[in-house]
Structures are given as C-alpha cells and as structure tokens.
Image (cartoon, rainbow, N blue to C red):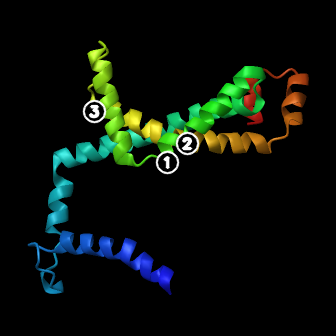
Amino acid sequence: GASWSLFFLAVALPWFALAMSALAPVAGKFSPSLWTLKNLRYVLGLPDFQQALLNSLGLAAAMASGVMIGGFLLGYVAVRGKGRRRGWAHLVVELLGVPFATPGTVLAMAVIFGSTVLSRAGLPLREPLLLLAAAYALKYAAVGARGMVAAFGQVDPVMEEAGRMSGATLRELLWTIW
C-alpha cells in the first residue's frame, strides 16, 4: 500500500526520470523510438570522466580500508583496553557518530572551512583528493569503529587469554583470534 507508493515516489520515479533523460537525444523528447545510448557512450568515453571515476573508486577503496583498520584498532582498545584508554576509546567511538549523522553537505562545508583555517595557520591543505579523503574518513569512521566494537564484544576474552598463556604475541593474537 502506502509504503510502496512512497518507495515509488521517493526512489523509483527519480531514477526513472534520470534514465529517461540519459536515453533521450534532446531534453523533453522521451519517445521510445528516439532512445539512444549515444549520450552515455560520449560521457563514458571522456578522459576526464574516466580519470574522475578511477580517482573516486580508488579513494573510496582506500578510505574504506583505512576506516576498517582504524576501527579495528579503536575497537580493540574500546573493548579490551585497560583503564583510561578504554574510556577514551569508547568516547571517541561515540563521538564518531556525530559526523555519520551529519548531512553530507554540512560535513563537506565543515571540511572546506577546516582546510581554510588550517591554511591560514600555515598548514596548507588544498588538495581536493585529500579533502575528499578526510570527508570520507570522517563520515564513515563510525561504521568501522562501531562494527568492530560489536565484533570484539562477541569474542570471549578467554580466547585471548588462552592465546597469551600459550605464548602468542599481540600480533599473533590479532591475526589468529580476531
């Protein structure tokens, strides 16, 4: 009923309009007999588009890996750490939820303004790929950290203790148990 209508209006209809615009040779001409893939071939053949696509995919893969590695380390300290480190790690994990809940446009503006402040302070940070990397990392750090905290919480500490008693180093524990 109503949920399918909302899905159609909010998701399917805009995608359909986008597809029709891409297939139409001229804006406003949506007759199926006029549909063509010429526009798509043109855009996909542009060297600038290909470079931008490669940059975006590479940056997304690098930041996803970095976020998961950082989340792994932060999650380990938050769950298995001792004393103040554990408390600080939990605080950081919770604070990482703020950028995740912030709309992307607001976060982008914050990154741009932050880079301007750093530039005025003598640390020039104007490289667009670095700014985009910072925005990706900020936006999705909570996903990596909270996922790892949940994963570490599922593993019984006895497993780690048994490994330590058997003489395993921290690196061996992280590789075999986690």
Q: Looking at the image, is mark 1 or mark 3 nearer the viewer?
A: 1
- The amino acid on which the numbered mark 1 sits, given as a three-letter code, is Ala
Residue 169, quarter of picture: top right
Q: Residue under circle 2?
A: 97
Residue situated in front as seen by the camera: 2 or 160: 2
Identify residue type, mark 2: Gly
Q: Are marks 2 and 1 in contact (CB under 8 Å)?
A: yes
Secondary-structure class at tag 2: helix
Q: Is residue 22 above or below residue 92?
A: below
Residue in the foreground of this view, choosing between 164 and 10: 10
Residue under the point 88% across and 28% down: 161
Residue type marked 3: Pro
Query: Which residue in the protein does label 1 denote?
Result: 101
Describe residue 52's horizontal placement relative to residue 58 as left or right.
Answer: left
The x and y percentages for residue 74 are 64, 30
Residue 101 versus residue 169: which sits nearer the camera?
A: 101
First-in-chain label (1 vs 3):
1
Residue at the disc numbered 3: 128
How far apart marks 3 and 2 lie (CA) works out to: 24 Å
Residue at left offset 27%, top offset 17%: 120
